[in-house]
């Protein structure tokens, strides 16, 4: 069977999937739809063996059983959200508005809605009066922390990085470098004087 369409005496019917897929032998028709107000019958039409086929389904008992069942409305809402997302005739704002409305109405998570858990249990009994109390801070085991007094001045943390030692080492390296440079210049001058003396002897 193909070209399956669902209608009611009140007019068009909002169902999913839409369009309905073709049915083969012994396959059930599974569809999620919202029962219109005042509708008593559902008409299923299609084409079977190149002939028009139709069947009327009573919605009276179906509506009563649907009220007792749980989760059918959520299933319809989820399918409806899929249908809205695939509808090319709706703008992005219209899709967002419709999906948000369905998510809030049926309490489901969508691309534009989420669920938030709120604990309404009171932490303090209503007959007790609230009071303030200082709580000691957690400190490492074996470490004593004294509370600051009015006479004590604030003191910065002594995060020693060895800056004084590094300064002394830098000065020593600078002095050693200057001494080596002076010694090098002295040796270079003596070598130059020796070369000049040798040249003078050869000329003589």
Image (cartoon, grey):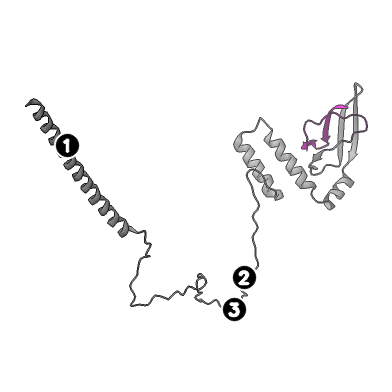
In this view, which residue lies farthest toward the top? 50
The range drawn in magenta is 1-27
In the displayed structure, 131 sits above or below 201; it is below
Task: Tell me: 173 left or right of 37.
Answer: left
Task: Tell me: 173 left or right of 11.
Answer: left
Residue occupied by mark 3:
128
Q: Residue at x 72, y 36 (%)?
A: 83
In the displayed structure, 25 sits above or below 142; it is above
Give coordinates of residue 122: x percent, y percent.
63, 69
In the displayed structure, 84 sits above or below 150; it is above
Q: Looking at the rendered structure, which numbered label has been put on residue 191?
A: 1
Specify whether residue 127 is painted magenta.
no
Where's the C terminus, which quadrant?
A: top left
Within 10 angstroms of label 3, few (less than 14), some, or many (20 or more) residues? few
Q: Secondary structure at mark 1?
A: helix
Residue occupied by mark 2:
123
């Amino acid at each position: 069977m193909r070209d399956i369409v669902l209608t009611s005496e009140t007019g068009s019917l909002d169902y999913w999937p839409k369009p309905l897929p073709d049915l083969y032998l012994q396959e059930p028709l599974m569809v999620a739809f919202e029962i219109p107000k005042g509708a008593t019958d559902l008409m299923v039409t299609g084409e079977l063996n190149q002939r028009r086929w139709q069947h009327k389904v009573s919605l009276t008992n179906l509506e009563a059983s649907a009220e007792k069942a749980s989760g059918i409305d959520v299933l319809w809402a989820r399918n409806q959200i899929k249908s809205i997302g695939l509808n090319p005739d709706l703008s992005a704002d219209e899709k967002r508005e419709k999906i948000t409305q369905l998510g809030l109405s049926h309490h489901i998570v969508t691309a534009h809605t989420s669920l938030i858990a709120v604990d309404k249990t009171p932490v303090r009994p209503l007959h007790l009066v609230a009071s303030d109390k200082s709580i000691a801070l957690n400190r490492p085991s074996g470490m004593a922390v004294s509370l600051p007094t009015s006479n004590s001045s604030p003191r910065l943390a002594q995060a020693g990085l060895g800056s004084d030692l590094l300064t002394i080492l830098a000065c020593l390296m600078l002095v050693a470098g200057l001494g080596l440079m002076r010694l090098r210049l002295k040796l270079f001058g003596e070598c130059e004087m020796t070369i000049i003396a040798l040249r003078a002897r050869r000329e003589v």
